[in-house]
Image: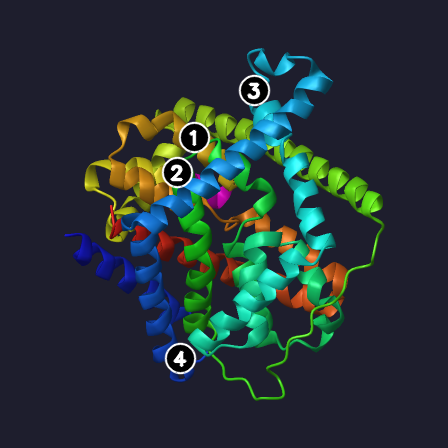
Amino acid sequence: MNIVFYITGLALVFIVGFISSRDRKKIQYKPIAIMLGTQLILTFILMNTKLGVVSIGFFSMLFSKLIDLGVTGVDFVFGGLENEKGSVFFLNVLLPIVFISVLIGILNQFKILPFIIKYVGLVLSKLNGMGKMENYIAVSSAVLGQSEVFLTVKDQMDAISKRRLYTFCTSAMSAVSVAIVGAYMEIIEPRFVVIAIALNILSALIVASIINPYKLSEEEDTLAIESQKKLSFFQMISESIMDGFKVAIIVAAMLIGFIALMNGIDYLFELVFNVSFQTILGYLFAPIAFIMGVPWADSVQAGSIMATKLVTNEFVAMISFTDISAGLSAKASGMISVFLVSFANFSSIGIITGSVKALSPKQGDEVARNGLKLLLGSTLASVLSATVIGLFL
């Protein structure tokens, strides 16, 4: 049955993408098939081989240790306050982002991260035949996040064509930032976070190839990565600390606002209709969850979490997910976990529009015009990634 639901989930992604496609005649099926095959091989290795299990265990242990080290700084500043009820999430999950941000800054300072991103992207471009910059953006988005990734190609933003811009932004919205991966791993099972990051790179490119197909000339297929302003080591440390702290505060503020808003909407719906808003969303998204392969008994709850992520953000949905995960099947839990690991939500439209507009007002306007289509593409990428993992659960 897993194969049947993999096919139905794949069909859902393809049909919706095909209907939304800008030029159906230009869809190149061979690269799509190669990337789908790569996803299956990669997921099989990660889920069913000793190498995969050890690799996932290593990354899980690494981020767990980084969180623990980050908490030591929190302990010093707050003196054990994090043990008090009501302050655990912010202090133990969000504030350690500051430490991880510093480590990313160090890896960037010594050109280790840019080297890895660039050459992984080049290898991927040989595999799928897509542009070097398309693959570079897809890989770097999975590390840097949707806002920071465009800084690395900022001097080329004005020259990027509208068709390529859509692909870049779809990859950015389908990714997450390594700086907050540790926070995700504190909420959901770490192995699904690792697998989702890998799958989303390919899922975004697959969906973009359906919705936004095009061919590049040799002249267009160039990659020039901008060198960031060189800072002294301790300047970089200071800026990284502040960047990490800003992320933690922004996430905390978003959680406060969105969770309160969702609870307020739920209260009103229960008052007027005697049913919660999230339950209604669950019934609306239940057929999609079922087509992806989520067992029917879990589909309403799964649909509710998927919808919550779409209308709020992944952190709000993850927190809601932890409240119901114990009552879900292992398959449903794994699929939802993978679905949640991306920036595909309404608020990201504003974030990515603002990020691009800061570098190129003209391109920012183009992103804004295609905001809903970007959300569609990135959401389909999450659906595809969740469908793939469902085949192996």
Q: Earlier in the sequence, mark 4 or mark 3?
A: 4
Provide the secondary structure element on which disc 1 rests.
Answer: helix
* Mark 2 Cα-neighbour bin, 10 Å: few <14, some 14–19, many ≥20: many
Q: Earlier in the sequence, mark 3 or mark 1?
A: 3
Q: CA distance from mark 4 to mark 3?
A: 48 Å
How many marks do you count on the picture? 4
Helix, strand or loop under label 4: loop
Q: Which residue is disc 3 drawn over? A: 88
* Mark closest to the chain's N terminus, 2 or 1: 2
Query: Residue type at mark 3?
Result: Val
Q: Which residue is mark 2?
A: 305
Q: Horizontal placement of 180 versus 50: left or right? A: right
Location of residue 391 in the rendering, given as x and y in whole percent from the top left corner: 24, 53
Give the magenta-colored segment's residue range. Answer: 307-311
User: In this view of the protein, which residue sits in the foreground, 305 or 184?
Assistant: 184
Residue farthest to the bottom? 218
CA distance for labels 4 and 1: 38 Å
Badge 1 amino acid: Ser
- Disc 2/disc 1 C-alpha distance (Å): 7 Å
- Mark 2 and mark 4 in contact? Answer it, CB < 8 Å: no
Element assignment for label 3: helix
How packed mark 1 is, by other alpha carbons closer than 10 Å (few <14, some 14-19, many 20 or more), is: some
Q: Nearer the viewer, mark 2 or mark 3?
A: 3
Q: Is residue 265 above or below residue 25?
A: above
Q: Is residue 84 above or below residue 260?
A: above
Looking at marks 2 and 4 on the same chain, the residue that comes earlier in the sequence is marked by 4
Q: The residue tagged with tag 2: helix, strand or loop? A: helix
**Main structural element of the magenta stretch: helix, strand or loop?**
helix
Q: Can residue 314 be found in the magenta stretch?
A: no
